[in-house]
Amino acid sequence: MGGMVDDDDEIALPRHPGPGFRRCTVRLEPGECRPYLADAWRDCLVVVESGEVDLETTSGLRHTCRGGDVLWLAGLPIRRLVNRGRAPVLITTVRRR
């Protein structure tokens, strides 16, 4: 069926999404923390390509996202992104220009 994704299928954002869009890759090394800057995630479709990243909220709660997870981070009460694992985390974003 068109538009359906099986659990075994991988989500992949296009390498060249077209003239109206911009693609970016974020890499978090093991142990690295990155502050959440709302403007950096505004209007972005986010895919965790590999690894595990913790989204730490302003209240201190954590939610772990894993490779293959698709996210929308705009407007969330996130304080920072943290790689607590031993491998790098790769995150790809696509947004309108």
Image (spheres, rainbow, N blue to C red):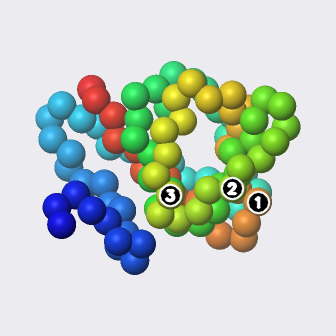
- The residue labelled by disc 1 is 84
Label 2 environment density (alpha carbons within 10 Å; few <14, some 14–19, many ≥20): some
Label 3 environment density (alpha carbons within 10 Å; few <14, some 14–19, many ≥20): some
Kindly report the distance in space between the C-alpha atoms of the residues bearing marks 1 and 3.
Answer: 17 Å
Q: From where the camera sits, is residue 68 visible?
A: yes
| Vertical comparison of 27 with 61: above or below | below
Instruction: State the quadrant of the N terminus.
Output: bottom left
Q: From where the camera sits, is residue 40 visible?
A: no
| Vertical comparison of 57 with 82: above or below | above
Kindly report the distance in space between the C-alpha atoms of the residues bearing marks 2 and 3.
Answer: 10 Å
The quadrant where residue 57 appears: top right
The quadrant where residue 18 appears: top left
| Residue in the picture at 27% in, 62% down | 4
Q: Earlier in the sequence, mark 1 or mark 3?
A: 3
Amino acid at circle 3: Asp
| Vertical comparison of 47 with 18: above or below | below
- The residue labelled by disc 2 is 64
Label 1 environment density (alpha carbons within 10 Å; few <14, some 14–19, many ≥20): some
Give the image location of residue 41, x and y in percent. 50, 31
Instruction: State the quadrant of the C terminus.
Output: top left
Amino acid at circle 1: Arg
